[in-house]
Amino acid sequence: MKTKQTVAKSKTQKKIEFKWYVAIGIFIATTIIFFWDHIVGNAFLWEDFAEYVYPVQSFAAREFAAGKLPFWNPYSFAGMPFLADIQVGFFYPLNRVLSLFIVDGTLPVKILELSLILHFLIAQLSMFFLMRNLKVSFWASVVSAISFGFSFLLVCHAIHPMIVIHLSWLPLIFIFYHKAISNASIKNATIAGLLLGMIMLSGHPQMTLYISLFLGAFFLWNLIADIKNSHFKNVSIFKYLVASIIPFVIAAGVFQVQYLPSSELAELSRRQEMTFEQASEGSLEIPQFITAVVPKFFGYQDASGTPKVAYYLKKHNTKGEEVAPQYYYYWETAYYFGIVTLMLGLIGAVGLFKKNRLVAFITVFSIFAFAFALGNNGFVYYIFHKLPFFSQLRIPARMMFAVAFGFSIISGFTIDNLKNVRLKQILIPSILPITIAVLASIGLLQSFFSIDENSIKIIQTYGTTALFFTVISFLLIYVAHKGKINIQFVAALLAIIAFIDLYIAGAEFNRSKVDYSQQYNLPEDAIKAFRSKYPDDIFRVNSRIYNPPYMAMKRNQGLISSIELLEGYNPLVLARNVPPLSREEIHKLFNVKYEIAIDSVRGVPYFAERKDRLPRAWLAGAAIVKNEDEVAEFMKTNKLDYSKIAVIENQPQINLPTEIDTNFSGSAKILEYSANKIKIQTNANMPSLLCLSEIFYPAWQTRVDGQQTEIIRANYCFRSIPLQPGNHIVEMEYASKKFTIGLWTTILALILSVVLLVVFRKEEKINLIE
């Protein structure tokens, strides 16, 4: 028989469950509305999503579906590491789910876009969970979730899914980390670590570093406060510290399967430590505080390519000189999170600073984040640039994620405490956004900047829109403070306003009308002609020229069509991937069968077939040894027959002449060829070098007749293997020791996590919808 207490508890549980289902429905609806055109096929994502993400994820999904780990990508830049490329995010679990949807060897664009859109739903749900765990009311939590889920830090980086993935899971990570610190809970700390490790695997080191900095600062803030409050009289400081540090340890361990191979690639890539000038590219300009109210005040850029007001705000270099803005600066410095959340956040920062420890932390960190985001326009970023890791990253404005995240949290607290703040704590913070909106709506603010007359009028309309949302938000906040309208009804209205505001401001950004998947569709006869016939006819294709500029295929077409291209598109490229030779010599060395040429009569480009290309593998009977720093200049100034002599950087363990011997004869035949493995049969009458038109990379291991043998870098960027006279079987396989170490480290971290969860299973029950 049920007691009154049981019945009451049951009713409360049903009420919670009802609200949980309502929240799911709301966030599904907002996500569908925001991305409706993408869902029904009227719009497509663009920029890096089309040029890089789609071909890369299609290749990864196809290879994994075939039961392969794609260590090497032979289809871009004549070959480069694939799995070691951190931006691929191969080990992020939801990326691997994509492999279930391969159709005829290709990942449908719709599936990839829906996968990204799903993360906007995750962002809202995880923020909702966070706010409910912080004891914030239902509709106030909805306001926080919508504001964060459609903030420009996510919307304008839909073209960079790795950033969206990091931010979408951040609130959930913060829930468990907050619980871990508050209760010295090892169980919550372990879950936080697993989630943090998971987003690290999605492949964006900058966001990983910035989020870790945010969490680390949160730990120190609480540690100092807990010491002052004598918190450790009741809680073991040892367990407290362990719970605070475990998430970073577990996350780092989980990440090793990606980090170690990626660090191997990073050491050989072009992206090494940057100068402060390079690293500060993408700094926030001080006047951009205006865009917290009028997001398109300085113009914008979107998928249409022809916005009504092109982004015009000039940037400043480290010398303080104005430089012309790049079009991508718009989305890299955009941080708008809505008028509703801005006003509630400012009110909360003023009114709740002394009453709520979390609000105080967020307020202080938001000030720091803004100062950091200023890059070369302030001093904070200059200090951090001197620290490890920070010197390798650009776009300091991305630190504004902490402001969007933090203000979304404060807005929920503010709604629930509107009756507890003073009227002046509402009026004073509201002055700034209202003033900006008024000045922009009448065109006065525009007079401080160099804007053409037509743009001034358009920006006035943006200002008028901002003024409307600012005034209506202020009025609702004011009447709620006065208690004239039910606070939850006001919160529901604010949630609607927040969504409409963010929809108007940002929904168009990603609506390209170009179905980029169609751009990767080559005629079957072209694919048949340009695709190598393994192992008998292996070759590469040159698909791009620069004078005159012309691209016959998409830059990463090779990943889609399995064509070995000389070109590609990847932000992370090996530093030594093209020898310092003429185009003619480069194509010969790179085994290029088809190259772009210009018809001398009609002046149009066409594919010409080369007859003098070197094979993928051949034997050279002579070698010249040069130091690493001498090779480029030597090859540039000396005309050599690379089919007979090689320039190498290490003395081989065989005696090779430094001049061509006419008595030398030898042959090399490829028996097997795949992305991760090559098998070659050789025969020579003298000591020789097996030279390959394959990019040198230390993770490749070689066996000659079953015996481990060294690989020597030859001809600036290629591989070679020294051979004794006679017949040999050479097997070359991608076998990264760092990957193996990283894999076992990740497995151990996962085992440790399971052990901790079992041992501390009796700690407080985890409830995401408290």
Image (spheres, grey):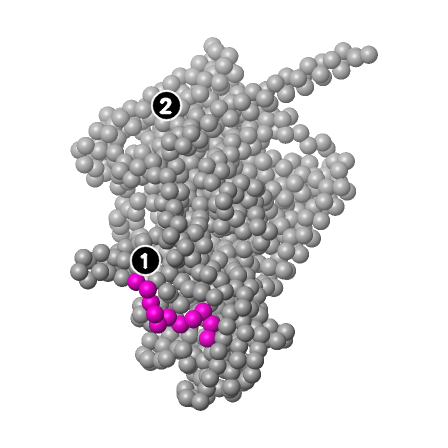
* Residue at left offset 33%, top offset 21%: 468
Q: Is residue 580 visible?
A: no
- Residue 614 falls inside the magenta stretch: yes
| CA gap, disc 1 and disc 2 | 51 Å
* Residue at left offset 52%, top offset 64%: 673
User: Which image quarter holds the N terminus?
Assistant: top right
Question: From what the image shows, is residue 467 above or below residue 260?
Answer: above
Tell me where residue 44 sits by quadrant: top left
N-terminal of the two: label 1 or label 2?
2
Numbered range of the magenta stretch: 608-618
Left or right: residue 339 versus residue 4 is left
Looking at the image, how many numbered discs can be counted on the residues? 2
Of 6 and 28, which appears nearest the observer? Answer: 28
Find residue 661 and report its horizontal and vertical position in percent: 43, 88
Residue occupied by mark 1 = 544
Identified by mark 1, the residue type is: Arg
Identified by mark 2, the residue type is: Thr
* Residue at left offset 56%, top offset 83%: 726
Of 261 and 183, which appears nearest the observer? Answer: 261
Tell me where residue 580 sits by quadrant: bottom left
* Labels 1 & 2 near each other (Cβ < 8 A): no
Question: From what the image shows, is residue 297 above or below residue 477?
Answer: below
- Mark 1 or mark 2: which is in front? 1
Residue occupied by mark 2 = 470
User: Which image quarter holds the C terminus?
Assistant: top right
Q: Secondary structure at mark 2?
A: helix
Find residue 267 and report its horizontal and vertical position in percent: 49, 63
